[in-house]
Amino acid sequence: MTGAVASSVTAPVGTTRLTSAPAADFATHLATFGPLPTSNPAVLLSALHDSGLEGRGGGAFPAWRKLAAVPGRERARGRRVVVIGNAAEGEPLSSKDATLLTVAPHLVIDGLLAVAESLNGTATYLYVRSSVLGAVSRALGERRDARKIELREAADSFVSGEASAVVSALAGRRPVPQDRPFLLTESGLAGRPTLLHNVETLAHIALIARFGPAWFRSRGTASDPGTRLVTVTGGGRPSTVIEIGGGAGLNDVFRFAGIDPAGLSGVLVGGFHGAWVPASAGNVRLDREDLARFGATPGAGILMGQDARHCPLTVASAIATYLAGETAGQCGPCVNGLSAMASVLSRLARGERDPSLPAELRRLADLVTGRGSCHYPDGTARFVLSTLTVFDADVRAHLAGTCRKEHS
Ligand code: SF4
């Protein structure tokens, strides 16, 4: 496939692409990136295919496959197709979508319009956190072509960004994952074919539509092309959002964010439903190939460095307790199993010297995995198992009563 694209403006060079406009207003956006080319469905699909862009919301599904899976209005037998830009960002460690919508809202709007136009007649929504409603509303008000985009406030919960939960919320129902399987691309919002993209994915689509797949691939690696936004936390510093080239090393990302990786004992990659990478693993790259051996993926670009002076089990216990409180309350194994796991991990973190605790955690993780209507219990179990594996020395120190790390 080939993707012929053109723009009146020079493509951004270097790693700073999504964040290259000096201000968020529409005039600056146009001066920086040029106007959005008219969307030709075949050209856009081809450009996305060749770019290798994968979703930036956590699922990493190829963007072109998602687009190809949704029938245009003709193939949908006259039904209007729905396109949703998802910035619910319920993960507490992530703020990259809110940051993007604050500094470059027009790239997101462009991406939404490009996808919608290529599907020939759609309803369009932006589903965003309350903190950025004002910024997005201002941006929408700056342009005539965005009048039909409906702006909706996202629910404030961990599961609010799950695809079926977004559709439920937009339909006026509880913003929780649906308890029976359904195919979004065939029958999503109001029974219409529905395409849901993370807002960062849409912003990349807006740039690929202008500057083409070869430009997109000119940063990053063959397996992780382009750039991505990451939210970095650790070392006692406030959380920060940076744009990096695909396949960047974890240690380099921390240094770039002003955090010394030498002071970390591990890195939580992918947020509360992610997995730990031990500091001893060296400069592992933030791409799927390198992270696979730790059961991690780049996910939604979330990195939390664990301070080596602090007890990781205390941190993991707090996260497991939070996750147990965030289930949608629909499935027994999820509701009961996650609170049981959190309780056992808390006993271990507090220093209870019962050698059966790790095995009990593994048993519970096995029990809940694959037993919910959505993947929520699976993600929680993965996080707990990863904690046991990567911080095995800390688990043994707790059981022996020899842990001397700070527990605050
Ligand atoms: S598995 Fe948990 S989060 Fe998912 S639908 Fe069931 S109760 Fe809700």
Image (cartoon, rainbow, N blue to C red):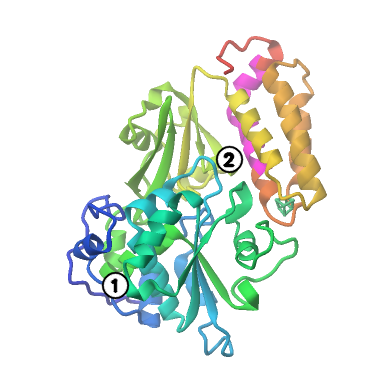
Q: Is residue 133 in sight in this rendering? A: yes
Front-lying residue, 1 or 252: 252
Q: Quadrant of the N terminus?
A: bottom left
**Residue bearing mark 1:** 36
Based on the picture, tell me whether residue 387 belongs to the magenta stretch: yes
Count up the numbered dots: 2
Q: Is residue 79 above or below residue 257?
A: below
Q: Earlier in the sequence, mark 1 or mark 2?
A: 1
Query: Which labelled disc corresponds to residue 125?
Result: none
The structure residue drawn at horizontal position 42% and vertical position 48%, both measured from the top left corner, is 96
Local SS, label 2: helix
Q: Which residues are magenta?
A: 380-397
The amino acid type found where label 2 is placed reads Phe
Q: CA distance from mark 1 to mark 2?
A: 36 Å
Residue 160 percent coordinates (x, y): 60, 53
Q: Mark 2: few, some, or many residues within 10 Å (few <14, many ≥20)?
A: many
**Disc 1 crowd, CA 10 A, few/some/many (<14, 14-19, 20+):** some
Q: Is residue 70 above or below residue 236?
A: below
Identify the residue at horizontal 51%, vertical 47% (top origin): 297
Q: Position of residue 328 (x, y in %)?
A: 71, 50
**Residue at (78% x, 35% y) in the render:** 340
| Left or right relative to 137: residue 25 | left
Q: Which mark is residue 272?
A: 2
Between 89 and 15, the residue placed more toward the observer is 89
